[in-house]
């Protein structure tokens, strides 16, 4: 594999150009923009790298790009999951360079989607190219699955899996992402939290009314305040009956988490905070971050929000809320409990819109997939990886782990300052280079297993 | 006074032309438009009607038009307060005829400002002209004060009063407005609620953060929810310590309110409601509307409020809140209590911005001013007026009642369908005619007192 690793170094600039070319396409799934253009460009890149490509389509779904290479002889198959869609880029005014004009500064590449998740698309495809171009073949079969709806709930992935099940069969899965800790150690995540995204809407009067009538005309924001207060206490504990019933947190999870370095003051500084949510400190704060479900307000809107003053009782109010779930919990069960909560506490005037959800899923620390990634990562980075029992985020990984039964781990080109989903999203070129090499080493380790 | 009343009928068309001429000038104070043009035209009208006019000016303030007539012999002086500025006319597309091209249809005059408050300016000036032209003199002294900043908070009125105090001295005041109930009875209001307008702002992280970190990064909306919940209970009762301490609601207020017709179902239908704020019904709902202070949310904003989903912990959150106050309460005292509340409950992370406020002010039902307006109104309309202990709105009237000590009441040319501050603002010509006659009768009653 030495030649493949050298190929990575020699061709890094070309790989970066490929990355910039796909980051220039604003493939924002929530706004249904640039999807086809992005698919065409990624298909080209896969083909140039020597892979067989199919663009799968389903009615009403964004295309799924499937790439594969099957050597003459192989015993193991590895499947890589990524997504080519990105989050919206607003607020635009906070970007130093335009989000869809990739810009290199201080050894970093800035663009919406460069960290989440286009950097890893290029790193993985070009790692395979590096082996193919230098060895003429691969020591294991590889499959790529690049979907286009991760940022809007990934609702089509299970449908693609149902229809093209044999294409998804593999011995080990590598999920989309992984970042480097400030101490230089690369992270490996063994699972993701579940997610359920809701909108709650209240309408009272049929128009905004002069606020002199506030004693008579009900205010929909007050109603949301009452409803939201019923969902969660000040420590973040969720008050919906049955919410914690099926949760599975193991002793092993907590033991793994204890290995994760965590410095309260540095972390507060990173986010510009004076205290953490729920006022937790130390390991309790880390547990709150990783091993507890959350109920979060993503946005709220009602009434007059311009400059200065306007005295009205607004007609309607809207709040967007997401729940992060832990293994054992499902969005379906939450929705059921939420409806019971609404009935029990008389909130039938709150309209519930359930947008989408993910199950939670975890690969056990004892899986052979964890050995492979640990060994490869140690070789690539010369340092022990940080193995997280679960990621703070959510993803359609449950389709691989729960539905297909593939032990799946994650690794990637991001770092602690990648500003995923935020203005000035970026990756470091050095991390991109090592992420490429790590994929080469993972394929190598797999072939020896 | 019979001749003066006949003069009103004979000259009504001319008066309407004068009204149309001032409604053609878009004197929108918030946009600083047409102010001087409007002042010049109103000054002309006052002079044509036989009054002495001064245009008072203060640095940075819109001019205040002062008109007066002092007969040889008189014992009482009446002062009329109005404002010549108007609200913006948008949304323009909802007007049937252009807002600044007064149009007569179905016995109504349509124009921005015709109800609020230019109809009353003309009615009052022309009522005085009608007496002067038919009797050659007035039986009481009259003063007119027409300011130009009522729609932007009336901040200059107290400054004019401080500088020209003697010009404002009077025995009785008549405030800007009054409308006719659907049952035909004219309304008289004995006071206005106070007002205090605040913004509350919370900033947590220095940027929006991926909501997977909701267990660690505090959410400013949750913080606002906690803060807002501490201010008010579900029935609308305000929980700030000391809030109700100085409030003056009398048995007389409640007795007056009992005379006001109120139909639950009709009122709900008017606003498209299924229930009232606090779930009050009947007289309890009417009391909640008139005789209770309120804490109202005018607008709230945080995070992602576009279409679809975005999973973030927002960095900051803003809410606009107004309090309506009752006599005895002041914005200054509220601000003081609010700061104590914030300290007591540990909400020091909530930034408080106090925008502006009005005191509340009421003329007691036992005042001679109430007798005069009751007698005059009964004579003019042939029906008993509806006397409201207080209006639902707020106004600079406290300058007259609290600062100058003038018992002040209100009456006017509007009706329940005048659409004040809305498209298609209008008054009925018949109400305009009666409003003129009512001013004649008020001056007559005053001279007999």
Image: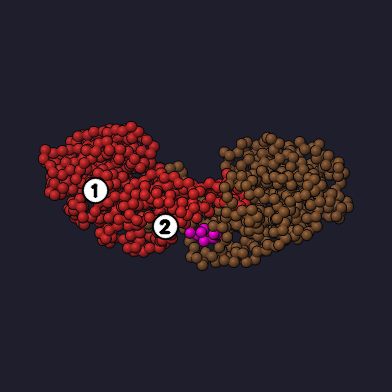
Chain colours: A brown, B red
Residues at circles 2 and 1 in contact by the CB criterion of under 8 Å = no
Residue under numbered circle 1: B408
Toward the viewer: A424 or B18? A424
Toward the viewer: A384 or A197? A384
Residue A289 seen in the current view: no
Disc 2 secondary structure class: loop
User: The C terminus of chain A appears in which quarter of the rendering?
Assistant: bottom right
Instruction: Kindly identify the residue that appears in the image at 61 percent across and 47 percent down.
Output: A268
Residue B282 seen in the current view: yes
Question: Residue B26 appears in which quarter of the rendering?
Answer: top left
Horizontal arrangement in the rendering, residue A125 relative to residue B375 (left or right): right
Toward the viewer: A21 or A237? A237
Q: Chain of mark 2?
A: B
What segment carries the magenta color? A226-233
Residue under numbered circle 2: B239
> Magenta span has B232?
no
């Amino acid at each position: 594999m030495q030649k493949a690793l050298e190929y990575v170094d020699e061709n890094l600039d070309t790989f970066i150009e490929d990355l910039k070319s796909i980051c220039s396409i604003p493939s924002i799934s929530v706004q249904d923009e640039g999807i086809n253009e992005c698919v065409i460009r990624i298909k080209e890149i896969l083909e140039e790298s020597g892979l067989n490509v199919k663009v799968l389509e389903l009615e009403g779904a964004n295309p799924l790009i499937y790439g594969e290479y099957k050597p003459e002889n192989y015993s193991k198959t590895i499947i890589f999951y990524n997504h080519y869609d990105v989050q919206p880029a607003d607020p635009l005014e906070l970007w130093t360079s335009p989000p869809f004009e990739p810009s290199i500064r201080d050894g970093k590449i800035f663009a919406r989607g460069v960290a989440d998740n286009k950097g890893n698309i290029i790193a993985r495809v070009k790692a395979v190219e590096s082996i193919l171009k230098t060895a003429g073949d691969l020591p294991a079969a590889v499959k790529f699955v690049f979907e286009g709806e991760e940022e809007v709930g990934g609702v089509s992935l299970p449908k693609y899996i149902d229809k093209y099940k044999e294409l998804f069969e593999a011995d080990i899965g590598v999920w989309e992402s992984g970042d480097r800790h400030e101490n230089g150690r690369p992270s490996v995540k063994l699972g993701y939290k579940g997610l359920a995204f809701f909108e709650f809407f209240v309408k009272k009067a049929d128009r905004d009314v002069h606020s002199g009538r506030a004693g008579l005309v009900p205010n929909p924001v007050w109603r949301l305040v009452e409803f939201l207060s019923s969902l969660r206490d000040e420590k973040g504990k969720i008050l919906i009956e049955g919410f914690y019933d099926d949760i599975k947190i193991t002793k092993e999870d907590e033991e793994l988490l204890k290995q994760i370095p965590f410095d309260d003051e540095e972390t507060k500084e990173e986010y510009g905070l004076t205290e953490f949510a729920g006022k937790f400190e130390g390991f309790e704060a880390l547990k709150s971050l990783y091993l507890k479900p959350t109920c979060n307000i993503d946005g709220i809107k009602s009434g007059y929000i311009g400059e200065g003053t306007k005295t009205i009782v607004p007609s309607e109010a809207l709040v967007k809320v997401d729940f992060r779930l832990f293994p054992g919990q499902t969005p379906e069960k939450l929705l059921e409990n939420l409806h019971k909560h609404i009935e029990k506490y008389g909130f039938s005037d709150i309209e519930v819109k359930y947008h989408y959800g993910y199950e939670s899923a975890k690969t056990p620390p004892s899986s052979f997939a964890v050995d492979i990634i640990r060994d490869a990562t140690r070789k690539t980075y010369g340092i022990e990886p940080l193995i997280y029992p679960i990621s703070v985020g959510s993803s359609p990984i449950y389709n691989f782990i729960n539905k297909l039964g593939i032990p799946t781990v994650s690794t990637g080109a991001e770092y602690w300052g990648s500003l995923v989903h935020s203005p000035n999203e970026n990756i470091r070129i050095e991390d991109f280079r090592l992420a490429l090499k790590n994929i080469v080493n993972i394929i190598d380790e797999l072939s020896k297993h």
